[in-house]
């Protein structure tokens, strides 16, 4: 097996697992700081990835995307939270929702800052060390892109993705219970659309969206092209 492909697999795993884990922990921590103990009580504030794995979203979906050479993203088990604990359920829902994408943005920026910090010495080290080459030219950009893919994917306004939390700010309070009730049905429909729509349209709108958003932002953050 080609050494670069092995490095690609290792970098993918090392990028994807912490990106998903910290995304979910950020949701739970935000809810906890807003007065909701649900995530802490169920052990979801842990940095142990095993507590957050969803068999399809964390394992099968990313593997399928890797095989298809699509942008790698996925999801973990949603961190449970109870909006009734929040003083203002609509604002609490919004803050809890955006905490995950913001955590991904922070990790992408951190990778970019490290790339800039090493930029002056990188050319020589890339020539001298294969390990540094993989770290600097493969892992750092992949870690940033995976986090940005997760951020922009989750910002789609489809329940229960994080982007749908903005609806909680806009909907009248009396409609919130109905809104929470439909969340369980929207996501399976969205996932089926994500798999089958590219074959119907002969065009992948989700890959295009992630390239335009995450890809362009990643290139702006880094000192060298990454997508």
Image: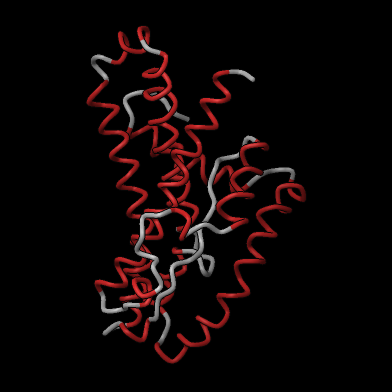
Say which of 15 and 157 sits in front: 15
The relative height of residue 116 versus residue 159 in the rendered view (above or below) is: above
Specify whether 52 is left or right of 93.
Answer: right
| Percent position of residue 86, x then y | 30, 82
Specify whether 195 is left or right of 8.
Answer: right
| Percent position of residue 116, x then y | 26, 26
Q: In which quadrant of the rendered view does residue 68 lie?
A: top right
Number of callouts in the render? 0
The relative height of residue 170 versus residue 95 in the rendered view (above or below) is: below
Specify whether 167 is left or right of 158.
Answer: left
Q: In which quadrant of the rendered view does residue 191 lie?
A: bottom right
**Residue lying at the far right of the rendered structure:** 200
> At 62% from the left edge and 56% from the top edge, which residue is drawn?
56
Q: In which quadrant of the rendered view does residue 121 lie?
A: top left
| Percent position of residue 143, x then y | 41, 37
**Residue lying at the far bottom of the rendered structure:** 174
| Applied colour scheme | secondary structure
| Percent position of residue 65, x then y | 63, 42
> At 36% from the left edge and 60% from the top edge, which residue is drawn?
46
> At 58% from the left edge and 79% from the top edge, which residue is drawn?
182
The relative height of residue 136 versus residue 72 in the rendered view (above or below) is: above
> At 47% from the left edge and 32% from the top edge, which residue is drawn?
11
The relative height of residue 215 versus residue 154 in the rendered view (above or below) is: above
Specify whether 168 is left or right of 92.
Answer: right
Q: Quadrant of the N terminus?
A: top right
């Amino acid at each position: 097996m080609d050494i670069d492909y092995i490095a690609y697999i290792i970098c993918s795993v090392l990028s994807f697992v912490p990106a998903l884990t910290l995304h979910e922990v950020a949701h739970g921590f935000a809810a906890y700081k807003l007065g909701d103990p649900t995530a802490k009580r169920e052990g979801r504030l842990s940095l142990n990835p095993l507590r957050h794995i969803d068999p399809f979203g964390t394992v099968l979906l990313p593997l399928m995307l890797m095989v298809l050479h699509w942008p790698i993203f996925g999801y973990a088990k949603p961190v449970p939270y109870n909006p009734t604990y929040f003083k203002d359920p609509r604002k609490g829902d919004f803050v809890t929702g955006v905490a995950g994408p913001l955590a991904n943005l922070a990790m992408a920026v951190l990778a970019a800052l490290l790339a800039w910090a090493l930029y002056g010495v990188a050319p020589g080290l890339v020539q001298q060390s294969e390990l540094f080459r993989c770290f600097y030219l493969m892992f750092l950009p992949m870690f940033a892109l995976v986090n940005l893919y997760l951020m922009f994917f989750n910002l789609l306004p489809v329940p229960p993705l994080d982007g749908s939390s903005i609806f909680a700010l806009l909907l009248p309070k009396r409609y919130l219970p109905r809104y929470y009730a439909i969340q369980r049905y929207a996501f399976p429909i969205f996932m089926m659309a994500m798999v089958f729509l590219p074959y119907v349209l002969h065009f992948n709108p989700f890959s295009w969206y992630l390239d335009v958003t995450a890809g362009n932002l990643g290139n702006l953050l880094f000192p060298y092209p990454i997508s």
